[in-house]
Image (cartoon, rainbow, N blue to C red):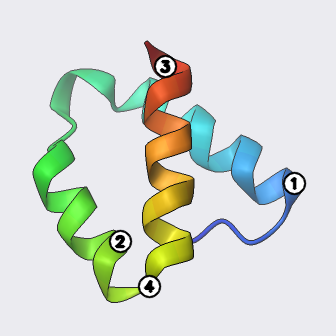
Amino acid sequence: MRATGPGKSADAANALNIAEQSLDVRLIARLAQRYGRDAVINLEKLLSEKK
């Protein structure tokens, strides 16, 4: 999932909320690493907002 703007970040957050029960955080983190440091940081922010 790639969220490049404010609207996209909200979409990504909604998708994470919907998929919460079946979310494989380790897999998503590994995939985010392929997109670079910014993707990892954004994913960590999204996941921390869920807690």
CA distance for labels 3 and 2 = 17 Å
* Side of 11 where 34 appears, left or right: left
Q: Report the disc number at residue 36.
A: 4
- Residue 1: x and y in percent read 48, 66
User: How far apart are the two marked residues, 4 and 2, measured between alpha carbons?
Assistant: 7 Å
Residue at 56% over, 56% down? 42
Q: CA distance from mark 4 to mark 1?
A: 19 Å
Residue at numbered disc 3: 50
**Residue topped by disc 1:** 6
Residue 42, compared with residue 50, is above or below; it is below
Q: Which residue is mark 2?
A: 32
- Work out whether residue 16 or residue 37 is closer to the camera in this orientation and state it: 37
The mark that comes first in sequence, 3 or 1, is: 1
4 or 1: tag closer to the N-terminus: 1
For mark 1, give the secondary structure. Answer: helix
Q: Looking at the picture, how far across and down is residue 36, in whole percent?
A: 44, 85
Q: Secondary structure at mark 4?
A: loop
- Amino acid carrying label 3: it is Lys
